[in-house]
Amino acid sequence: MKFSSKVLKCGLSPMRKFHPYAVAAEAKGRKIYHLNIGQPDIETPKAYFDAVKHFDLPRSSPSRIPPTWTP
């Protein structure tokens, strides 16, 4: 497969440099939480969604954001 010159200039994600450190830490018995896209596979606490649902800026705030999210 041939890649464009722009893609070739991008390089790998800088986060990849941490992988060897994570592997070494796991080898020492340390628990590593891999926070990649789609991870961790734990349930988001209900309190988080409640806080988002009930978040409100003061009415006098010039940066008031209208609520658009409903669970």
Image (cartoon, rainbow, N blue to C red):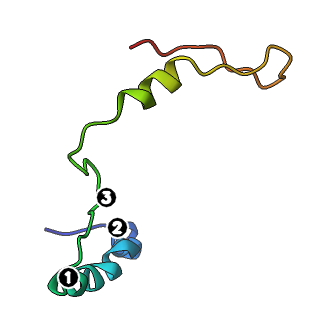
**In the rendered image, the vertical position of residue 17 relative to residue 66, given as above or below:** below
**In the rendered image, the vertical position of residue 48 relative to residue 36, given as above or below:** above
Amino acid residing under circle 3: Leu
**In the rendered image, the vertical position of residue 24 relative to residue 34, given as above or below:** below
Rendered image quadrant of residue 24: bottom left
**In the rendered image, the vertical position of residue 39 relative to residue 63, given as above or below:** below
Q: Quadrant of the C terminus?
A: top left
Disc 1 versus disc 2: nearer the observer: 1
Residue 43, disc? none
Element at badge 2?
Answer: helix
* Circle 3 residue: 35
Q: Residue at x 86, y 16 (%)?
A: 60
Amino acid residing under circle 1: Val
Q: Residue at x 80, y 13 (%)?
A: 59
Q: Residue at x 36, y 71 (%)?
A: 13
Q: Using a 10 Å C-alpha cutoff, classify the residue at mark 2 as few (fewer than 14 neighbours), some (14 to 19) or many (20 or more).
A: few
Whether the residues at callouts 1 and 2 have beta carbons within 8 Å, the answer is no
Q: Which residue is more in the foreground, 4 or 20? A: 20
Q: Using a 10 Å C-alpha cutoff, classify the residue at mark 1 as few (fewer than 14 neighbours), some (14 to 19) or many (20 or more).
A: few
Left or right side of 18 for 61: right
Rendered image quadrant of residue 29: bottom left
Residue 7, disc? 2
Q: Position of residue 15 (x, y in %)?
A: 37, 72
Element at badge 1?
Answer: helix
Left or right side of 23 for 18: right
* Circle 1 residue: 23
Distance, label 3 to label 1, CA atoms, is: 14 Å
Amino acid residing under circle 2: Val
Distance, label 2 to label 3, CA atoms, is: 25 Å
